[in-house]
Image (cartoon, coloured by chain):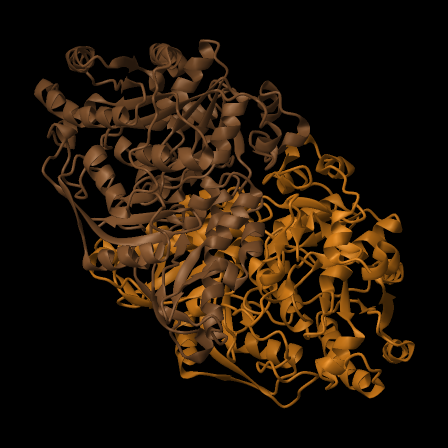
Chain colours: A brown, B orange
Amino acid sequence: MKSDIEIAQSANMKPIQEIAEQLKLSSTDWEPYGYYKAKLSHTLLEQLSERPNGKVVLVTAINPTPAGEGKSTVTVGLGQALNKLNKNTVVALREPSLGPTMGLKGGAAGGGYSQVLPMEDINLHFTGDIHAITTANNALAAFIDNHIHQGNDLNIDPRRIGWKRVLDINDRALREVVVGLGGPAKGVPREDGFSISVASEIMAILCLANSLNDLKERLSRIVFGYTYDQQPVTVKQLGMEGALTLLLREAIKPNLVQTLENTPAIIHGGPFANIAHGCNSVMATNIAAKLGEYVVTEAGFGADLGAEKFLDIKTEAGGMEPDSVVIVATIRALKMHGGVAKHSLEEENIEAVQEGIKNLEKHMGTIKHFGLPFVVALNRFPQDTETEIEVVKNWCDQSDASFALTEVHAHGGQGGVELAQKVIQTVEMGEKKFKRIYQREDSIEEKIHAIASKVYGAEKVEYSSKAKKQLKQFVELGWGQLPICMAKTQYSLTDDPTLVGRPENFTINIREFSPSIGAGFLVALTGNVMTMPGLPKSPAALKMDVDDNGNALGLF
Amino acid sequence: MKSDIEIAQSANMKPIQEIAEQLKLSSTDWEPYGYYKAKLSHTLLEQLSERPNGKVVLVTAINPTPAGEGKSTVTVGLGQALNKLNKNTVVALREPSLGPTMGLKGGAAGGGYSQVLPMEDINLHFTGDIHAITTANNALAAFIDNHIHQGNDLNIDPRRIGWKRVLDINDRALREVVVGLGGPAKGVPREDGFSISVASEIMAILCLANSLNDLKERLSRIVFGYTYDQQPVTVKQLGMEGALTLLLREAIKPNLVQTLENTPAIIHGGPFANIAHGCNSVMATNIAAKLGEYVVTEAGFGADLGAEKFLDIKTEAGGMEPDSVVIVATIRALKMHGGVAKHSLEEENIEAVQEGIKNLEKHMGTIKHFGLPFVVALNRFPQDTETEIEVVKNWCDQSDASFALTEVHAHGGQGGVELAQKVIQTVEMGEKKFKRIYQREDSIEEKIHAIASKVYGAEKVEYSSKAKKQLKQFVELGWGQLPICMAKTQYSLTDDPTLVGRPENFTINIREFSPSIGAGFLVALTGNVMTMPGLPKSPAALKMDVDDNGNALGLF
């Protein structure tokens, strides 16, 4: 079998102009970024506003394991398969962060014969959106510290600045730092820390904004810290919303590329789903829905994280509703949820599959809570046995759940035809009765309780004393009506990454809150989740290289 | 008079394809980045290697003052003027850093009717080169800290890591930091600091590399720190040269744009000239010389900084020689060198001009030391009086120096015709006898002495005890043959920014060295020069904005 990058590099890409023409875009609707990437106009969504919306299919998954689930691969493969069935389909994905690419993953543009292209560009700097976000985030940080250094007219308390600097890299050593050391020429000393760029509130804002003006308004509302008398201080007070908007003027434009089978793909925004809201941009998804009969989009990690936030946060900001959900599972991941160690995954293990299905069952329950029809997509790996696959299929049949085996990695769109047919069925039966897990007017505790109990299956929620104090403060500040963005480990339904499968009778621990007033939600940090990942002992980047012709090596 | 951005936004830009065709480039030689920017192939220089070289004109200046000299404006204007005189000319400039753009300057793409376009893009993220450098630099930093955290097989001494993180922003509070705080999950604590991205050794490497392979080899040679037994540790030992090259795979490609009068401009690389080597890339300048009869390029700040490094470092790395030099001065700046305060610049002051000319005289002497013919370009400002201008002109005549008044800001290429004619004269007379200020085989102290005495006019050089210790160590490590990159304030010939004009009998103080083994030089830090600028009280960014149509405001 060829590697991902070998398949990508031997692909038959169309010039991006042909993809744009395929979508009936005029030449003023887009700008080329190289021969195979384009930026769509920031006014395109407004121009298309009168068009009817295509059907939105949300791809989610069971809790991820080190065995890999291939959610992006299924998303791309399903888009290709729908096109094979003559449904004009656009794929809407997130932009990969360099952090995991350089760290563990080595790439995040799908796999095998279901990839988005050019995968090297998409996995590296792409069209620079994440770098623009990093720059805007750190410009704000520099301006805050400079304001304090230059006299602090706004009376900002250096001990109460919530705005962290960011880098698009996994850098453990930057989690907790002290800045401003070295005397009066070097600023005011204070405790600080860096997050990964994709956890920045500016990334969330970019993904939730409906227009350039909405972007600027959201940026102006950012609360980056508090005064000495504990009043929130905003970007508007600092006068920086114009400069931040200017820095994001290109980044707000969604990016057009294509899949291996020339299906149009709009890739835009890339917040992680564990420490951020985990969905691509509202503008990208809504444009895709105007351009395609179907949009296939994904939300990060399991349905407990990305899908919950897609459905509770993104659908409200973007005024959209999914018409169907796909829940991706693999035999290997189910076995890990059933207690098998990674090195024993090659052996057939029926009981482990049966035990692991409980994790899948929980996520199916979550989608039912949201009132949405779904299809379980079993993403086939070469080592899976027929018996193991039968176990899942039979269980789905008995549970009255739609099931499809997919082989999109090995066969591209052709390997996703069964899934595409099932998805079309669920959409055309039109049985969705979408409702959110909580209402805006619920109290913060009620919202968190709803997510913890209905989505995670927790018994109760406990708040640290800091979190309790913040709760009180947030209500006083009028932030009680905002949705909640849970920050939680992706590996478990609980806040403890070691508890796989379907844990019961557990407590979700809210350590602290971080208000994202510009994005329009409150981040609740659970357990020990950190907003800056670390690198493993042997990072993926150590295998990366460029050959003499300038071709990328070591991405997958 | 219209503002720079108003002039830029009403310009008649040609599609970049037409500019490429004007240069007789084939469609495989370049890739579009939007309609008005292109990346040139990384193999273009090699493909053109058999062609003869055009004439290289280096634009430098007197020591800059807060009054502004307009060196980039003259560079662009001269390029336009040479084209008016039917010399096919390509302009080769540096990419602006966001630090000064957001801080004091508000832009760095020329001015008035001598600008490079699209100025908004060039001043903001452009084609992402600086962001790629930031990313590569910080990836290396993260991998170093991770290596130590994961067991430190290379025995790296955390107290002796010279590799700083960087951001492309002025951020005083990051000059001295402590990283790795917060316990075992958050790395190994150590003192650290951030520089601005354009001071990164990776920026210097990108600018001095002749090819993609040369880039990789230089990256592999970077010495980022020392072991506990004080042996240097390289990127090659860490195994990261492949990943770093991959991250720079697009950034190594020079960028093609155009001036207001559609003169082709290649903009690539952007090291500062005070804390780095201050020249655009070797690849860009050499490609420009293959494509044009004339290349007009600039080096940063005064002839004591950018030009010295261009002539001692860049010409050697790139195998090139300038055919003529332009020294830019303004009446306003000469008056400041003559002792006038900024608020009194509007008043005519003949004596101050005469006194300030001594600064110009010193830089003329420097260019003579290098054996190069030159033209003094007096860049006219509206407030300059005829009498003041006469003073400079007459002094040049008496000194047997070629002189030209330029009005390229107000009149574009037409305002630079006299300068262009004088430049062509100096080139065609062919009187250059280029020699460097020092030889590679000179000792480090001899090289520094040569620069300090011949270029700065210093009486002596003093070394701190740290610098002396490093000198000894560098010789032992075999680095004694490397050229020197001086880091010195741009405002003075001395290492004290307050001493303007032409100081005499002064000492240059070498505080410490920083070896840039990949770039191939030793940085000598003088006085209190810092590698991370700070923001002023009212940064330029506070006036920036985007209008409802997405147009940039507040850049100039």
Which residue is depicted at the point 45% across and 40% down?
A: A208
Quadrant showing the C terminus of chain A: top left
Tell me where residue A422 sits by quadrant: top left
Residue A533 in view in this figure: no
Looking at this view, name the residue that lies furthest to the bottom.
B505
Which residue is depicted at the point 61% across and 35% down?
A: A43
B370 lies left or right of A138: right
A450 lies left or right of A326: left
Tell me where residue B230 sits by quadrant: bottom left
Seen in the picture, residue B531 relative to A464 is either above or below; the reply is below
Foreground of the two, A335 or A120 = A335
Residue A166 in view in this figure: yes
Seen in the picture, residue B103 relative to A90 is either above or below; the reply is below
Q: Residue A499 appears at what percent x and percent y?
A: 13, 38
Q: Residue A382 appears at what percent x and percent y?
A: 25, 17
Q: Residue B160 appears at what percent x and percent y?
A: 33, 68
